[in-house]
Amino acid sequence: MSAKGRVLGALGRLVLREGRVAQVIDLAPRLCRVVVTGDDLRGAVWVPGDKAQIVLPDRSVRTYTPCSWDAGAGATSFLVFVHGDAPGAAWGRTVRPGDPVRFLGPQRSLRAEGPCVVVGDETAFGLAEALDAFGVFEVSDHAAAAAFVREGRGVVVPRGDLSAVADQVAAAAAGRALVLAGRASSIQGLRPLLAARGVPWPKQVKAYWADGKRGLD
């Protein structure tokens, strides 16, 4: 349980939206789509790239990007990548239809106007879908990547080959805004590589996770 989770849990419906899981669609062994519905989701103002902070069953809080939001029907969906043993991974392994879901949001996070390129890893799939963006993804789970990255939707680079990531970004960036998300060390490592290729550092950057740390926004 996190301090934020305790506070949000205590405030409950004063600040949180509440829904229930309508579907869990397994896309790959470690990637699923969670569809949430409920009256609290109706009328929400959502902009692609906004975030939702979900209070998990153990009252820790993890941030996900809604892939879509139907404010009329009261429905949203999240892509959940199960990695490691953190609370978010435990939720992704055990979430089932009918489970309650409480969250804060949608809230402003990463946005892009016009065509864009999302650079990240498996945890950035939801952002790329929300922004309808071309993706350059540094991945370790090729089954999850194959399930998400369709022809024309993006390219996949093996985890650790940041030089190849930078090459792909340089090739895709012309006329498109850049959005960086995902692993903190990869984002740091890309800065000099993109500069060497003449690619300006983007304004829209957010680390979703870091090795040895939990609960990054």
Image (cartoon, grey):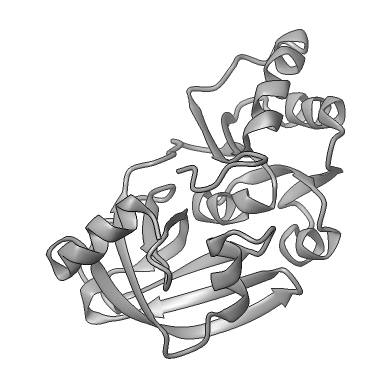
Q: Is residue 11 left or right of residue 136?
A: left
Q: Is residue 34 left or right of residue 37?
A: right
Can residue 41 be seen? no
The percent coordinates of residue 88 (x first, y second) are: 54, 62
State the residue at coordinates (33%, 58%): 5
- Residue 176 position by quadrant: top right
- Residue 183 position by quadrant: top right
Quadrant containing the N terminus in the rendered view: bottom left
Can residue 62 be seen? yes
Check the image and name the residue furthest to the left.
Answer: 14
State the residue at coordinates (30%, 79%): 73
Residue nearest the observer in this picture, 25 or 89: 89
The percent coordinates of residue 191 (x first, y second) are: 67, 17
State the residue at coordinates (69%, 53%): 122
Please tell me whether residue 164 is drawn above or below residue 208 in the rendered image. Answer: above
Please tell me whether residue 51 is drawn above or below residue 28 in the rendered image. Answer: above
